[in-house]
Image: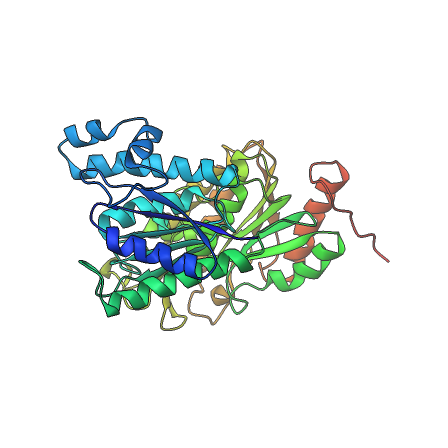
Amino acid sequence: MTKTILVIGTYDTKDDELHYICERIQSLGGQVLSMDVSVLGDPSKPTDISKHAVAEAGGSSIQAAIDSGDENTAMQIMARGAAALCVQLHAEGKIDAMLALGGTMGTDLALDCAQALPMGVPKYLVSTVSFSPLIPPDRLSPDIQMILWAGGLYGLNSVCKSSLSQAAGAVLGAANAVEKPVAGRPVIGMMSLGSSCLRYMRHLRDPLEARGFEVAVFHATGMGGMAFEALARQGYFAAVMDFALSEVTNLMGGSVANSGTDRMTNAGAMGIPQMVAPGCADLIDFAGWQDIPAAYADRPFHAHNRLIKSSGLSPEERRTLVRDIAARLEQAKGPVHVLMPTQGIEEWDKIGEPAHDPEGLAAMVDEMGKAIKDPVQLSMLDCHINDQGFADAALAVLDGWIADGTVKGGAPVKPD
């Protein structure tokens, strides 16, 4: 089937560039639905979705946007409308992917549109600030693709055509090739880090698959948590094993490697059964290119690679973190079971390793016992998070949920 790409941009100022993209998509066999998100001017020829329709979808009008006298206010009106129309057009089966073009204003709007669409719908952004630190992590949808709009701030030229044509081919290719996440079996969503730090996924994946589940493991480095939370919002998981909470720690510590303020909230809001453990919640992960802030200079330190380096939390900071975790979990509409391995929560906190901190671990264990209250369940486990005993405890909780019907679709594995 021919795929239809929604092309979004300010057609009053980027008319030539947007028409070039549309022509490239059509020349490759795709169809185009054009959306004008400009405010002041008009395109050279009518678009499929006018700026007036966009403003109305945002609960306002073009005249109100103009009368505001503020370009930020005006573009937020257009962003609300464009995002709402993206949802509507996708639900009606009228678009298969989106491609947006813009400078900072168009990029700001396009990020909202991308976040409005579910995972598996290709989302491409050609921007003058692609990959820039101006874009905060929580504005990025989990599967967005970006390409720098090089040499394209004003007018078509051979340099910017290279970017635009690549984007046209990429979005159409993705629309043709994508296998959207449609689960054939009930899915367990699991958060983890690299297997050198957290190893429970090695112990858990095969037993979970033997129980009839598909296992999706997300990397807790910011974008992984965003993808996990996006799918939780869609009700995609039968249950979650949220065993790596470093993104919550990073949010508390001001690190860019976080996944937004809604981390650890969406599964609970959807009533999805949650198992939670504070894997790697003793470390703040900083970007490798950043200097460690002076406040953390005397902490346990681990340089994981050139991209990530970590500093440890003080005992009091761990207590603060546990209280934050408890506050997030107590809002859940479904069952929650916290597993606290009292012998350690990541590979580098063992004796002789750089993050070994018995006082800090003891504070976390103590605060967990104080902060976690009914109906959230708490199990103190006399093991390390990477021990087989931790995985066995998690499977025991899951088997209980399967047996009483809390988790649908699986079957406990009987011992030989």
Eyeballing the image, is 288 above or below 397?
below
Residue at the far left in the pictured view: 69
Q: Which residue lies furthest to the front in this view?
A: 45
Viewer-proximal residue among 348 and 363:
348
Q: Report the residue at 36% width, 73% height from top.
A: 306
The colour scheme used here is: rainbow
Image quarter of residue 376: top right
For this rendering, which residue is in front, 152 or 188? 152
Which residue corresponds to the image point at 67% horizontal and 54% vertical from the top-left? 214
- Considering depth in this image, is 220 or 409 the residue closer to the camera? 409
| Residue 316 pos. (x, y %) | 36, 48
Question: Relative to residue 172, is residue 403 drawn left or right?
Answer: right
- Residue 396, visible in the rendered structure: yes
**Image vertical order of residue 146 relative to residue 262, above or below:** below
- 226 relative to 235 in the view: left or right: left
The answer to whether any part of residue 257 appears in the image is: no
**Quarter of the figure with residue 374:** top right
- Please state if 76 lies on the left or on the right of 318 as rendered: left
**Residue placed furthest toward the right:** 416
Q: Image height check: is 289 above or below 41?
A: below
Q: Which quadrant: the C terminus?
A: bottom right
State the image coordinates of residue 204 (x, y, percent, origin top left): 66, 58
> Residue 266 appears at what percent x and percent y?
50, 39
Q: How many marks?
A: 0
The image position of residue 122, as x and y in percent, is: 46, 53
When the figure is inspected, residue 80 is found, relative to residue 162, above or below; the finding is above
**Observer-nearest residue: 314 or 385?**
385
